[in-house]
Image: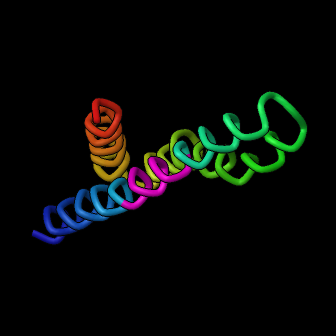
Amino acid sequence: MDNLLSQILYGLSGFLFALFSCRYGTLATARMKVAWQTHGFSLTALLATLPSILFLVIAIFVFPLWLYTRTSVGGFVYLATFIFYSSKNKRK
């Protein structure tokens, strides 16, 4: 019973972390788009978008890998939720 409850909680944490990452990932990509449109391809645009790029790298690659090494259920739920909501936001 404890193992089942732990897996459910890991899945819930993966889901909630993915919602957070997806929401701020959408804001980060919008910020990057505005910076590239304003400054073009320049060092200023790169420096303005550096925090957004760093957040996206962590949200897409580093955190899911770290979560998957701790619990496979949480990592799977995180990636599935992140991919689903990111594709849903892209269509808008």
88 shown above or below 68: above
Q: Residue at x 31, y 32 (%)?
A: 87
Q: Is residue 25 magenta?
A: yes
34 shown above or below 15: above
| Outermost residue toward the left in this view | 1
Instruction: In this rendered view, identify the residue nearer to me: 42 or 5.
Output: 42
Q: Residue at x 31, y 40 (%)?
A: 89
Where residue 71 appears, as percent x and y from the top left, is: 37, 53
Instruction: In this rendered view, identify the residue nearer to me: 47 or 37.
Output: 37
* Labels in figure, total: 0
Instruction: In this rendered view, identify the residue nearer to me: 15 or 91.
Output: 91
Q: Is residue 45 magenta?
A: no
Tell me if 45 is positioned left or right of 9 in this view: right
Q: Split into 4 quadrants, where in the image is the N terminus?
A: bottom left
Tell me if 60 is positioned left or right of 13 in this view: right
| Outermost residue toward the front in this view | 38
Where residue 16 appears, as percent x and y from the top left, is: 30, 63
Q: What colouring style does the render use?
A: rainbow
Where residue 72 appears, as percent x and y from the top left, is: 35, 46
Find the magenta span and give its range. 20-28
User: Which quarter of the figure has residue 12?
Assistant: bottom left
| Outermost residue toward the right in this view | 43
87 shown above or below 6: above
Q: Residue at x 56, y 50 (%)?
A: 28
Where residue 30 appears, as percent x and y from the top left, is: 52, 45
User: Which quarter of the figure has residue 40?
Assistant: top right
